[in-house]
């Protein structure tokens, strides 16, 4: 018989992952629980006003919600009734005490382990879906199995989806990773977890390892991706200084099949809830094991990323005649990438703060992230938030494009030019607009790495 599933944590990971698991396993009951009542209410909202925006997600939730997917705040009942518990709670960077600013804050995760132990009334397989430091499963096992009436087997099944393409990534993953203990109970639990995914993922793409390799692989994979973005951004600065064009350089580097073309797009630096957090976590792990040179190497990836945002503001300062005070700048896009409303660690936030420090009058526009932008910048005076790009640009000296939303190239840039102060500047930090066409209209145009 197929076993029922509960997922603790109804966020960006828990919601979409479980929706797809429920879709592809119609004979399993899947319950997603959270302590956040408002979030659960949004997942259950009659008009499908879900708490997160992901292309294609509403359609999946419409199909499975109430059929075999349920959202609830009753953690006790859900844990009791299931056989397999996924844990997808948040693991932010710790901001206090030992490891502050680098290590993962495991308090939410630890609370979850205690909840599972308290409410369980039978043996359970517990699957880490959150991204965790290596050897966290050992701590979870220690809490769960200490003095326990039931047997808990802990697996690591890190998630590789990217926001904005979550549903597609879940439906057609490059690989699914399941790490388990190398004993009989561990092997049996891994086989159960494989069954969940095998209902739609080809077997050869379901990779199994030991638990520690699975936990470390997730951190390493994000660090490699972040490192590629920092590497191309390091080249972008050199391009601006020498007259080379970073998009041309990236195209040719990427044509080498050993390197490949993906993740070579220069821009305002990486954002999102995970790259910085996971690289910092890796740095902390390296330091904890006395691997100081490795720690420094990975720290450089973060330092390069912050430098990219500082460089964007410095260039704007130079190009706007060394004074930004009282000038109006419109930020087009606040989400950390297109097709998401998520603004966690968004480069637009860092740029907004650097500009606010120069007493710039800021107008922010974004098709999906305006609510989050308002919350993130609530402490800054005089920022206006506009749904409408043309209104945001009214009277502005510069438009700084921060997020590569597909709608931006299609805007009426002649009309935008018409409402701006002259000389009107466009700083396209994503290199996604037609610079030649903008120049023809009369704009001064800046790009990253050109
Ligand atoms: P999130 O903040 O969106 O969601 C986490 C949820 O867990 C919140 O709704 C919170 O209320 C809930 N929660 C916390 N403690 C709880 C408890 N004791 N009981 C019940 N619910 C509790 O976070 P997220 O973006 O979904 O990330 C979760 C994990 O997944 C992180 O470790 C992250 O690194 C990893 N991850 C995220 C992504 C992504 O694209 N966001 C991708 C891969 C991995
Ligand atoms: C990333 C990884 O891609 C996922 O595999 C992983 O599961 C996830 O982190 C996680 O652990 O949370 P995500 O942060 O959602 O996914 O989005 P990405 O597409 O990786 O983009 C991250 C940032 O890098 C964005 O700000 C994006 O604009 C930037 N980026 C990406 C570039 O600047 N250039 C590129 O070439 C690619």
Image: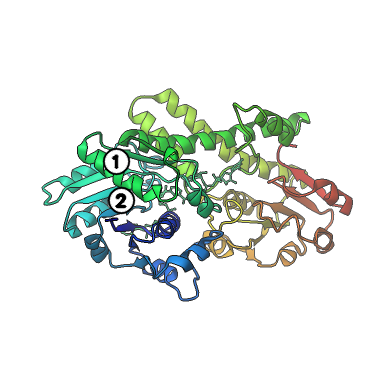
Looking at the image, residue 120 sits to the left or right of residue 421; the answer is left
Circle 1 is placed at which residue position? 136
Dot 2 lies on which element?
helix
Looking at the image, residue 164 sits to the left or right of residue 78; the answer is right
Residue lying at the far front of the rendered structure = 1
Residue that appears at 44% across and 25% down: 294
Q: Compared with residue 399, is residue 182 higher up or lower down, i.e. above or below?
A: above
Residue that appears at 77% across and 47% down: 320
In front of the other: 86 or 373: 86
Near mark 2 (Cα within 10 A), the count class, few <14, some 14-19 or many ≥20, is many
Do the numbered discs 1 and 2 sit on residues whose CB atoms are within 8 Å? yes
Residue 266 is drawn in which quadrant?
top right
Q: Does the residue labelled 2 lie within 8 Å of ligand 1?
A: yes
Judged from the image, the quadrant occupied by ligand 1 is: bottom left
Question: Which image quarter is the N terminus in?
Answer: bottom left
Circle 2 is placed at which residue position? 109
- Residue 92 seen in render: no
Residue that appears at 18% across and 52% down: 123
Looking at the image, residue 54 sits to the left or right of residue 393; the answer is left
Q: Residue 24 at what x, y percent from top left?
A: 43, 56
Looking at the image, residue 390 sits to the left or right of residue 96; the answer is right
Near mark 1 (Cα within 10 A), the count class, few <14, some 14-19 or many ≥20, is many
Q: Residue 164 at what x, y percent from top left?
A: 56, 53
Q: Is mark 1 within 8 Å of ligand 1?
A: no
């Amino acid at each position: 018989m197929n076993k029922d599933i509960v997922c603790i944590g109804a966020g960006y990971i828990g919601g979409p992952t479980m929706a797809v698991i429920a879709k592809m396993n119609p004979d399993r009951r899947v319950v997603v629980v959270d302590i956040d009542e408002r979030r659960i209410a949004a997942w259950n909202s009659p008009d499908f006003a879900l708490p997160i925006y992901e292309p294609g997600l509403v359609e999946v939730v419409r199909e499975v919600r109430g059929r075999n997917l349920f959202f609830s705040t009753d953690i006790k009942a859900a844990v009791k009734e299931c056989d397999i518990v996924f844990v997808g709670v948040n693991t932010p960077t710790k901001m206090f005490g030992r490891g502050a600013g680098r290590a993962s804050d495991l308090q939410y995760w630890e609370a979850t382990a205690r909840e599972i132990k308290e409410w369980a009334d039978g043996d359970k397989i517990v699957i880490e879906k959150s991204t965790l430091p290596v050897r966290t499963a050992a701590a979870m096992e220690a809490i769960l199995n200490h003095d326990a009436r039931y047997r808990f087997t802990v697996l690591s099944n890190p998630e590789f989806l990217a926001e904005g393409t979550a549903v597609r990534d879940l439906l057609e993953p490059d690989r699914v990773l399941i790490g388990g203990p190398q004993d009989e109970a561990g092997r049996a639990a891994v086989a159960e977890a494989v069954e969940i995914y095998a209902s739609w993922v080809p077997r050869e793409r379901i990779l199994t390892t030991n638990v520690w390799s699975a936990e470390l692989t997730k951190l390493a994979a994000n660090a490699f991706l972040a490192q590629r973005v920092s590497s191309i951004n390091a080249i972008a600065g050199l391009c601006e200084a020498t007259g080379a064009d970073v998009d041309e350089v990236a195209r040719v580097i990427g044509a080498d099949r050993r390197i490949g073309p993906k993740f070579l797009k220069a821009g305002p630096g990486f954002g999102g809830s995970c790259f910085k957090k996971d690289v910092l976590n890796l740095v902390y792990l390296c330091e904890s094991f006395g691997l100081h040179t490795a720690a420094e190497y990975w720290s450089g990836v973060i330092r390069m990323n912050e430098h990219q945002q500082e460089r964007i503001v410095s260039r704007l300062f130079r190009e706007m005649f060394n004074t930004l005070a009282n000038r109006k700048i419109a930020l087009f896009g606040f989400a950390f990438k297109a097709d998401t409303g998520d603004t966690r660690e968004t480069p637009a936030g860092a740029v907004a703060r650097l500009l606010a420090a120069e007493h710039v009058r800021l107008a922010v526009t974004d098709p999906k992230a305006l609510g989050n932008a308002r919350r993130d910048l609530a402490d800054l005076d005089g920022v206006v938030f506009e749904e409408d790009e043309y209104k945001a640009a009214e009277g502005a000296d510069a438009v700084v494009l921060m997020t590569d939303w597909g709608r931006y190239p299609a805007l009426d840039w002649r009309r935008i030019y018409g409402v701006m102060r002259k000389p009107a500047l466009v700083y396209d930090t994503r290199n996604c607009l037609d610079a030649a066409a903008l120049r023809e209209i009369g704009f001064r145009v800046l790009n990253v790495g050109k």
